[in-house]
Image (cartoon, rainbow, N blue to C red):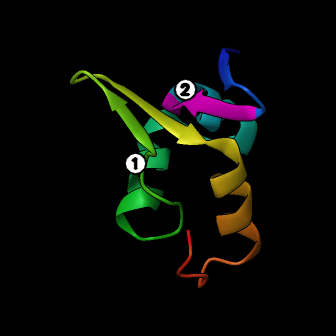
Amino acid sequence: MKTLHSGSVEFVRAKTLAIKLNCGESTIWRLVQRGLLPPPTVRIGKRCTLWRWADVERHLVNPNDENI
């Protein structure tokens, strides 16, 4: 499982996020489309997207928080 750290911030790719949430990568993208997960925080090129793990956790706890 790959995670990237920038200082004290942890970033995860779709594959790692799927593992942490016990679902498939395509499910991650469906959850983003439905607003059940936040959109990726960083895009590196066309095929590499990263989520800030703290944003994902915050969104799972309180999905209606508009500060995410």
Q: Quadrant of residue 16?
A: top right
Work out whether residue 53 or residue 17 is closer to the camera in this orientation and state it.
Answer: 53
Residue 6 locus on image (x, y percent):
65, 25
- Few, some or many residues within 10 Å of mark 2 (<14, 14–19, 20+): some
Q: Residue 63 at what x, y percent from top left? A: 62, 77
Q: Is residue 13 magenta?
A: yes
At 64% from the left and 56% from the top, the residue drawn is 55
Q: Which contiguous range is marked in magenta?
A: 9-14
Identify whether 47 is placed above or below 65.
above
Identify the residue position indicated by label 1 in the image.
29
Name the foreground residue: 27 vs 68.
Answer: 68
Q: The C terminus appears in which quarter of the rendering?
A: bottom right
* Quadrant assignment for the N terminus: top right
Residue at x 65%, y 67% (from the top left corner): 59
Disc 2 is placed on an element classified as helix
Indicate which disc, 2 or 1, sits on the residue closer to the N terminus. Answer: 2
Amino acid at pointer 2: Lys
User: For this view, does 50 lie left or right of residue 43?
Assistant: right
Q: Position of residue 58 (x, y in %)?
A: 72, 64
Question: Which residue shows up at 24% across the image and 21% down it?
Answer: 45
State the residue lying farthest toward the top.
2
Looking at the picture, which amino acid does disc 1 mark? Trp
